Image (tube, rainbow, N blue to C red):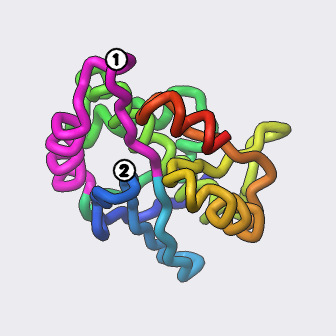
Amino acid sequence: MVGVVTTGAQKPIDLQTDQFSIHAEHEESGKSITCVGEVSPLPNLHQETFEEARSQLVCVASILSGKRLPLSVVSMEGALEGWLTAIGLRPDTLMPSVRFGLESALVKCASTILGHTEFGAVHVNGLLSSEPAHVLEDAESLVLRGFRGIKLKVGRARVEDDIEMV
């Protein structure tokens, strides 16, 4: 694959939705998009806290800004890890939740620029992490945005709230 995407950190951290967003521009096609990756460390599951992940995201955003991402990262054959290392982000030092959110957003940006919305038979799922009162409304919004599958985030609140949400 040929081409690169210039990345920037546009509103890199959204504390209300635990998401990391990346703004990307592709000069050749004139496309400009913002893609999101979820960063949600869970208590009693992840070693990092959300505050620690947020702090690492601030550092990642400053390193990422203005970098040129090769579109070959969508090959999923080590290109993304190699690129991260080349720009000074050692993937093995990233917290698991931060690495997941960063890689998700970067691959989504490159895929979208290339016109891909799925990887073979694997579709991207929408994420529900709302309060129980808003779950149905948010699920409908995800379906209208084209998501074919929805992931419901549980284990962050009381068990009773999670049961109500499901």
Indicate left or right for 63 with 39 as reference.
left
Q: Mark 2 points at which residue?
A: 18
Residue 148 lies, with reference to residue 39, above or below; the image says below
Q: Within 10 Å of the Cα at label 2, are there few (<14), some (14-19), or many (20+) other Cα atoms?
A: some
Secondary structure category for the residue under label 2: loop
Give the camera-side residue of 8 and 50: 50
Indicate left or right for 149 with 121 as reference.
left
Across and down, in percent, residue 111 comes to 63, 55
Residue 20 lies, with reference to residue 5, above or below; the image says above
Can residue 106 be seen from the camera position used here? no
Mark 2 residue type: Asp
**Dividing the picture into quarters, in which one does residue 123 lie?**
top right
Q: Are marks 2 and 1 in contact (CB under 8 Å)?
A: no
Q: Mark 1 points at which residue?
A: 44
Give the camera-side residue of 10 and 132: 132
User: Alpha carbon of mark 2 to alpha carbon of mark 1: how far?
Assistant: 17 Å
- Image point 53% across, 33% down: which residue? 160
Circle number at residue 145? none
**Dividing the picture into quarters, in which one does residue 91 lie?**
top left
Across and down, in percent, residue 2 comes to 59, 56
Which quadrant of the figure contains the C terminus?
Answer: top right
**Residue 12 counted in the magenta span:** no
Q: Residue furthest front?
A: 160
Which of marks 1 and 2 precedes in the sequence? 2
- Image point 24% across, 25% down: which residue? 48
Secondary structure category for the residue under label 1: loop
Across and down, in percent, residue 85 comes to 29, 32
Residue bounds of the magenta highlight: 37-64
Mark 1 residue type: Asn
